[in-house]
Image (tube, helix red, strand yellow):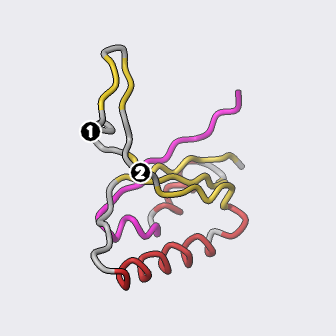
């Protein structure tokens, strides 16, 4: 088993507290369904900055990250299968997946 970082991008923000509670309930149910494969629950993130040799800008790049988590899976294809049921996908977002490499 290897660890995979799920970087969440996009997804619509809830417009009401009730909608927010419903979205959080979907996330909680999905995360619970991951069981022991959930290595690090991660969190949503706020504004991001991009740092390069040219300096620092407040744009977060072309597709800024909106949150992250780490799961354990047999391989990247299995991690992709897990991501297909992520609530962010039904909410207009996407999941970028990368294997965590031991240093």
Structural crowding at the residue carrying mark 1, measured as other residues with C-alpha within 10 Å and reported as few (<14), some (14–19) or many (≥20): few
Label 1: element kind: loop
97 is within the stretch colored magenta? yes
**Do the residues bearing badges 1 and 2 touch, measured as CB atoms within 8 Å?**
no
Image quadrant assignment for residue 16: bottom left
Asked whether residue 66 is drawn in magenta, I would say no
Mark 2 Cα shell of 10 Å, populated few (<14), some (14-19), many (≥20): few
User: Is 5 drawn above or below residue 83 in the view shown?
Assistant: above
Q: Which residues make up the magenta segment?
A: 85-103
Residue on which the image places disc 1: 62
Tag on residue 19?
none
Say which of marks 1 and 2 sits in front. 2
Q: Residue at x 63, y 74 (%)?
A: 32
| Mark sitting on residue 46 | 2
| The C terminus - image quarter | top right
Whether 61 is drawn above or below 13: the answer is above
- At horizontal 68% and vertical 61% (from top left) the residue drawn is 37
Q: Residue at x 50, y 72 (%)?
A: 27
Q: CA distance from mark 1 to mark 2?
A: 16 Å
- The image quadrant of residue 34 is bottom right
Q: Position of residue 94 (x, y in %)?
A: 36, 56
Q: Residue at x 53, y 63 (%)?
A: 82
Give how far across and how far down residue 40 sits, in percent.
65, 55
Q: Position of residue 35 (x, y in %)?
A: 69, 70
Mark 2 secondary-structure assignment: loop
């Amino acid at each position: 088993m290897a660890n995979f970082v799920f970087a969440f991008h996009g997804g619509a923000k809830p417009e009401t507290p009730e909608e927010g509670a419903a979205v959080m309930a979907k996330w909680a149910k999905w995360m619970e369904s991951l069981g022991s494969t959930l290595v690090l629950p991660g969190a949503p993130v706020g504004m991001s900055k991009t740092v390069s040799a040219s300096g620092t800008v407040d744009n977060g790049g072309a597709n800024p990250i909106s949150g992250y988590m780490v799961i354990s899976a047999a391989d990247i294809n299995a991690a992709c299968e897990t991501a297909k049921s992520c609530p962010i996908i039904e909410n207009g977002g996407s999941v970028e997946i990368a294997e965590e490499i031991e240093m």
